[in-house]
Structure formats: structure tokens, C-alpha cells
Image (cartoon, rainbow, N blue to C red):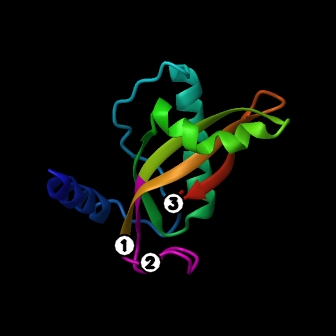
Amino acid sequence: MKKLVSVLLTIMMLFSLTACGNSTGAVTPAYSSEIHSKEDIETAIDVAKSYFFKEFDGCKLLTITYGGDDILENHREFTESGDIKDVIVLVSDFYVSPNGGDGSLNQNDIYTDWKWIIVKDSNGNWVHKDHGYA
């Protein structure tokens, strides 16, 4: 099944390559949460997509979703700061085109289970805090 998903993601990627960060059309698999509202999670996804669009030139966001309530325990350090009120962890898959990335990513490669740390600041706004493998 995992191989089939990888093949399907590769095919999707081939039909939608662009020269800049592309988050349009990213699939959001189903999720549920007893901690966060659907609205908060959707806002966090929008924040991550916006960051991806601005900063991931030559990359295509394939999937992005809520990482689950249990993943938060590994990222509680972000809420220990007085100016951060809450944290949402997202996971995504994305493709780096043969000319994409900033040199820190492998070109022509698919990254899976990439984490996005989105935090609620002291003003109540969801903002990008960190990303990567964590």
C-alpha cells in the first residue's frame, strides 16, 4: 500500500511541477482531534501552505494534515515559552524538482513525514515556528 501511495504521489507531482513553491492542490487526508478545533487546524494548514509557497522554490506540496493529538507530547517545549499559547504539529509530503530547493534539500526527491510546527502567539495568531524532521 505504501508503495502504491508513493507511485500515485509521484504521478501527481509530474503533472503539477512549477518553478516556485507550489502548495495549490495539496491533498489533506482526514484527521481528528480532541484537542484542537477543525478551524484551528485548517488555519494552521493555511499558515504552513503559505510558508511553503514563499520559501520552498521548485517544490510541490503533495499532502499536508494534522499530525495527531499524540504527536504534541514531543513538541511541548514550544509552549514553555511565555509568548506561545498553543502548538499544532502538521505532517506533509512534498517533492523537490530537479532544479528546486535552496541546496539543503535533495533535488528530484520526495520528502515524507515532514513536520510543521505552527504556534499560537500571544496575540492569538497562528504562525510558523519551525519545520523539518523532528
Q: Is residue 127 visible?
A: no
Query: Can you identify the residue that label 1 sits on?
Result: 109
* Secondary structure type for disc 1: strand
Queried whether the magenta region covers residue 99, the answer comes back as yes
Residue at mark 2 to residue at mark 1: CA–CA distance: 6 Å
Between 9 and 115, the one lying in front of the other is 115
How many labels were placed on the picture?
3
Between 38 and 50, the one lying in front of the other is 38
Q: Residue shown at 67%/47% (left/top)?
A: 128
* Secondary structure type for disc 2: loop
Queried whether the magenta region covers residue 71, the answer comes back as no
Q: In terms of sequence position, does the residue under pointer 2 or pointer 3 come before the other?
A: 2
* Residue extent of the magenta highlight: 93-108
Query: Can you identify the residue that label 2 sits on?
Result: 106
Amino acid at circle 3: Tyr
| Side of 77 relative to 113 (left or right) | right
Contact between marks 2 and 1 (CB within 8 A): the answer is yes
